[in-house]
Amino acid sequence: MQKSIVLFFSLLAVFFIPGRSVAQEKAKVEITTAQQKGNTVEFTLTSAKKFIVGGNVYVLHVGDKTFSHYKQSMHSLSFLIPSGDFNNLSDGANVYLTYGNENEPERSLEAMSKPGQGPCWSLGKFNAQILTK
């Protein structure tokens, strides 16, 4: 009998006490540094939340260029971009980060970066002045 009473009050609590329904927000990702290391630029992104470690890869999109070679730690990704490629990137180009190789021509990166639209982050505009040597 006591188990039935506990079950009854548990069900009442579930149905009649307003709960919070919070949509899961994407972690905020920021461009932090771009550092010259030999013939490579380490373009580093950070997040307060951990980056996913899984079967897919992160892809950095700068304008129409993509980069998927990176080093990863819990809270940072450092994309390894050849210096020549970095020097050819256009200032003001849109920068996005995707998880997985997003090949959906009908959906732009801008649309995919909207809240609730999947693993894509808009990181602002590219500025070559971030590079330190």
Image (cartoon, helix red, strand yellow):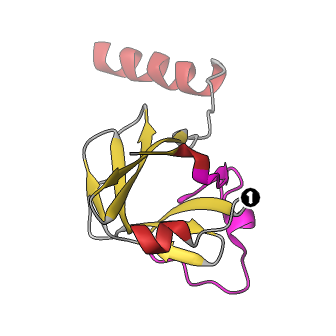
- What residue do we see at 56% from left, 41% from top? 24
The answer to whether residue 100 shows anywhere in this view is: no
- What residue do we see at 30% from left, 66% from top? 39
List the residue tagged with mark 1. 92
- Overall secondary structure of the magenta section: loop
Pick whichever, 14 or 128, lies toward us: 128
Tell me: 9 left or right of 90: left
Magenta-span inclusion, residue 120: yes
Tell me: 66 left or right of 73: right
Residue 19 image-quadrant placement: top right
Residue 88 image-quadrant placement: bottom right
Q: Name the quadrant of the C terminus.
A: top left
Residue 93: x and y, percent? 70, 63
Relative height, residue 16 to residue 52 (above, below): above
Tell me: 57 left or right of 24: left
Residue 94: x and y, percent? 70, 61
Residue type at mark 1: give it.
Gly
Pick whichever, 28 or 69, lies toward us: 69
In magenta, the rendered stretch is 100-128
- What residue do we see at 62% from left, 40% from top? 23
Pick whichever, 85 or 66, lies toward us: 85
Residue 70 image-quadrant placement: bottom left
Relative height, residue 81 to residue 8 (above, below): below
Residue 67: x and y, percent? 44, 72
- What residue do we see at 26% from left, 60% from top? 38
Q: Secondary structure at mark 1?
A: loop
Relative height, residue 111 to residue 16 (above, below): below
